[in-house]
Amino acid sequence: MAGEIAFIELGVADAGKAETFYTALFGWRFEAGPSPEGRMISGLGVTAGVHSGDPAAAPYVFFRVEDVDTAVARVRELGGAVEEIDVEGDEDMQRRYGRFRLCRDDQGSSFGLYAPPRSQ
């Protein structure tokens, strides 16, 4: 279904420190992520991750779409913006984890688009 919350990503300065903090606070469990700078968070009821080196140090909510390219075009048509930052990775990562794009709505609020791997 399009538009449901599909993924939450926490951008932080240091993923290891975030793991320590959120494990102590909420009891979250972490495992290796798709990149050395990130971790996947398990047990939340929604797919979630954390990555290092984010100067914004902000959470990102990703909404599920069937086709990222079509949704990106629609964001632009509606007056929103698409970040030029590549968060999708290489083709192997896309096959394993899906496609992601960071966007802003027509008022500047950040959100993400996520299309899961074709097998999901």
Image (cartoon, rainbow, N blue to C red):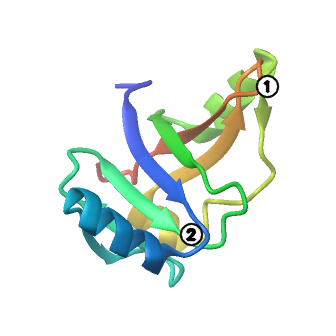
**Quarter residue 20 falls in:** bottom left
Residue 35: x, y in percent?
51, 79
- The residue carrying pointer 1 sits among few (fewer than 14), some (14 to 19) or many (20 or more) residues within 10 Å by Cα, namely some
**Lower sequence index among marks 2 and 1:** 1
Residue nearest the viewer, comparing 115 with 57: 57
Q: Is residue 108 left or right of residue 119?
A: right
Q: Does 8 sit above or below residue 91?
A: above
Q: Secondary structure at mark 2?
A: helix
Q: Does 116 sit above or below residue 12?
A: above
Residue for badge 2: 91
Q: Is residue 11 left or right of residue 64?
A: right
Residue nearest the viewer, comparing 37 with 68: 37
Q: Is residue 40 left or right of residue 50?
A: left
The alpha-carbon separation of the residues under discs 2 and 1 comes to 24 Å
Residue 42: x, y in percent?
23, 61
Residue shown at the point (42%, 25%) measured from the top left: 2
Residue for badge 1: 76
